[in-house]
Amino acid sequence: MKNRGRLLIAAHFMYDEHQHHLEPMNYECIHCKALHCLDESTHRSSYSFYDCCAHGKVVLDSLPEYPDDLRKLFSLRHLRNKCRVYNNMMAFASFQANLMDFGISRPGPYCFKLHGQILYNMNAASFPKDIENATFGQQFMIDEKEAVKQRIENARQNSKGDTKDDIKEEIVTKLTNIISRINVHAESYRMMNYQKSKKQTNDDM
């Protein structure tokens, strides 16, 4: 039985010599311009696809243009190479899920595997107990310079290898300023901080 089980596992990872290829993904949907493989089309003569817009039945508003200063940052090779690090530094909540590790080596690209429910944990308290320990959304309630300092320190503590010394303060400063200016959630945190400060002032009077 053991040998049979091993053979079944080995057979599972054997390649079929008659593989099917979808060919290049360079066919535009005539309705929404999304790119597809030709075999995905149900109306090959017209290049109309269902998976993107249901043959033109689903129409979404165009995404708003992002600010020029953010566009300039995206042109930097450093930011593109470290985008995950900088993205995590600007997070409003932490990500929690059960990651799956099958303990075996599989061919092909890495696959990020999850099981069960995905949770996004926001701060347990709306306001930080002290400025030095602000995290996630709380960092939009404190002084921007202090927030930049904390984001860099936290990123270096949680990063490995060259990333620790490869975080540029000027980029973190620009991202903090941009998000504080245009993000509705950052505005909400600032409003909460304003209301708290106003209440403290009234209580002192």
Image (cartoon, rainbow, N blue to C red):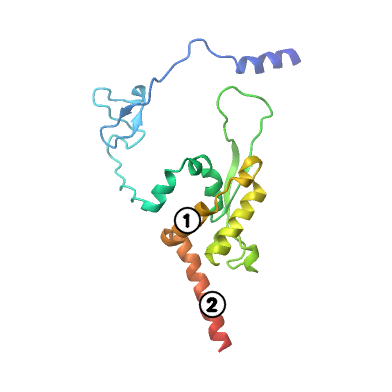
Cα separation between marks 2 and 1: 26 Å
Dot 2 amino acid type: Ser
Circle 1 Cα neighbour tier, 10 Å, few/some/many (<14 / 14–19 / ≥20) = some
Q: Is residue 122 above or below residue 7?
A: below
Q: Which residue is mark 2?
A: 197
The N terminus sits in image quarter: top right
Taking the spot 67% from the left edge, 25% from the top edge, the residue there is 104
Q: Is residue 103 above or below residue 67?
A: above
Residue 200: x %, y % from top left: 56, 81
Q: Which residue is mark 1?
A: 174
Q: Is residue 94 above or below residue 32?
A: below
Q: Is residue 1 visible?
A: no
Q: In the displayed structure, does residue 58 sit left or right of residue 102?
A: left
Taking the spot 47% from the left edge, 40% from the top edge, the residue there is 77
Q: In the displayed structure, does residue 174 sit left or right of residue 39?
A: right
- Judging depth in this view, the residue of 24 and 53 nearest the camera is 24
Q: Which is nearer the N-term, disc 2 or disc 1?
A: 1
Dot 1 amino acid type: Lys
Residue 54: x %, y % from top left: 32, 36
Q: Is residue 95 visible?
A: yes
Circle 2 Cα neighbour tier, 10 Å, few/some/many (<14 / 14–19 / ≥20) = few
Residue 122: x %, y % from top left: 58, 58
Q: Secondary structure at mark 2?
A: helix
